[in-house]
Image (spheres, rainbow, N blue to C red):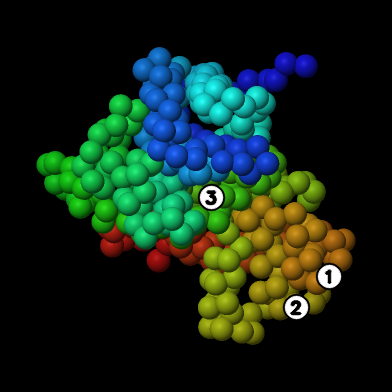
């Protein structure tokens, strides 16, 4: 059966990643890296995609690309096949180089775009290969932070953004380092969205930029949409959820919520509800974390959804917490001294 082409839209951005089959290397030396970027240049010159950021590691790669014709799958097929042929020919090797089709995630909104760039830039740092993104020679950070060019790299979108952020008339490498020199707080979330995105609609665009009204509307939408069985695509990370809820619970340890005729502690229910709706965890994952059965978690998730729909005080309180969580996860207003969820 022929593979179904991935749908995409001209002008939209995508975070694309693939790795070597069985975790083998896809770039063993400088010549391999040169061939990798030469293949990337070919698909750029063919007018299929524009590359706004990229990083090549020894076993995998990440690209932040903009689809120009609505056929970025064609560019990826040409690019991966070309690199595989060149790599294999140099080693008299047969067989696939990549583990299969690439993974991709639509990049919707400015905050997500910024953090994907940071994530790509800091991949070599996280891997312990270099201490600064610009020291890794096989990535876009090297060019932006050192003021060099590459035939495959579309510099304009990032340069225009940095100039707008600084208010400067010209782009400088120092301004880029100031903007992107710190890795994204949402690095684990970016990985989860790319590799384990869950099912259903990716509604991050409903939340970014973050405002209290957006989070409340999103929570109502999720509560109405939820079928109690399928996790959605994550928009926040469990680590950040726990950090925010821990502080909130310390400030208000006796908060309770009314369930029919009884009152119960609010914080465990809020946590389960956010792990499910915002983090996209499976019922089994939450059950293992909490230490109760899946059926109990299912019931508590449905209770949370019911409260969001029917209890305005509960919904507004949880929406305010989610707003704080998203501010931390997506680094909203970084460097600009502003937040939206005060």
Q: Which residue is most to the left? A: 169
Q: Is residue 295 left or right of residue 59?
A: right
Dot in front, 3 or 1? 3
The residue shown at (31%, 61%) is 338
The residue shown at (30%, 27%) is 151
- Marks 1,2: beta carbons within 8 A: no
Residue that badge 3 annotates: 190
Quadrant assignment, res 10: top left
- The mark nearer the N terminus, 3 or 2, is 3
Q: Is residue 333 above or below residue 82?
A: below
The residue shown at (44%, 24%) is 39
Quadrant assignment, res 25: top right
Q: Is residue 38 above or below residue 319?
A: above
Q: Residues within 10 Å of mark 1 (few under 14, many from 20)?
A: few
x then y, percent, for residue 76: 53, 25
Q: Is residue 146 left or right of residue 243?
A: left
Q: Residues within 10 Å of mark 3 (few under 14, many from 20)?
A: many
- Whole-number angstrom distance, CA of label 1 to CA of label 2: 20 Å
Residue that badge 2 annotates: 263
- Whole-number angstrom distance, CA of label 3 to CA of label 2: 37 Å
Does residue 170 appear in the picture of this structure?
Answer: yes
Residue that badge 1 annotates: 292
- SS class, disc 3: helix
- SS class, disc 2: strand
- Whole-number angstrom distance, CA of label 3 to CA of label 1: 28 Å
């Amino acid at each position: 059966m022929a593979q179904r082409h991935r749908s995409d839209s001209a002008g939209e951005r995508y975070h694309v990643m693939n790795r070597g089959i069985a975790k083998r290397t896809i770039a063993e030396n400088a010549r391999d890296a040169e061939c990798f970027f030469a293949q990337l240049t070919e698909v750029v010159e063919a007018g299929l995609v524009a590359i706004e950021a990229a990083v090549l590691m020894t076993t995998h790669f990440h690209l932040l690309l903009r689809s120009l014709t609505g056929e970025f799958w064609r560019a990826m097929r040409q690019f991966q096949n070309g690199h595989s042929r060149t790599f294999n020919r140099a080693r008299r090797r047969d067989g696939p180089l990549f583990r299969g089709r690439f993974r991709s995630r639509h990049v919707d909104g400015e905050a997500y775009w910024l953090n994907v760039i940071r994530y790509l830039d800091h991949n070599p740092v996280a891997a312990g290969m270099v201490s600064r993104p610009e020291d890794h020679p096989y990535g876009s950070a090297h060019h932006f932070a050192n003021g060099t060019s590459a035939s495959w790299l579309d510099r304009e979108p990032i340069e225009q953004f940095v100039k707008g952020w600084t208010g400067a008339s010209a782009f400088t490498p120092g301004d880029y380092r100031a903007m992107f020199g710190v890795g994204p707080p949402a690095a684990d979330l970016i990985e989860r969205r790319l590799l384990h995105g869950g099912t259903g609609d990716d509604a991050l665009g409903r939340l970014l930029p973050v405002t209290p009204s957006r989070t409340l509307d999103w929570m109502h939408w999720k509560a109405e949409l939820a079928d109690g069985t399928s996790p959605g695509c994550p928009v926040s990370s469990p680590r950040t959820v726990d950090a925010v809820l821990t502080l909130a619970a310390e400030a208000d340890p006796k908060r309770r919520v009314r369930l029919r005729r009884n009152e119960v502690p609010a914080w465990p229910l809020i946590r389960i509800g956010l792990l499910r709706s915002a983090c996209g965890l499976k019922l089994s994952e939450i059950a293992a974390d909490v230490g109760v059965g899946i059926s109990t978690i299912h019931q508590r998730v449905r209770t949370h959804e019911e409260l969001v729909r029917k209890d305005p005080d509960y919904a507004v309180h949880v929406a305010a917490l989610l707003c704080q969580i998203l501010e931390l996860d997506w680094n909203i207003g970084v460097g600009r001294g502003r937040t939206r969820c005060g």
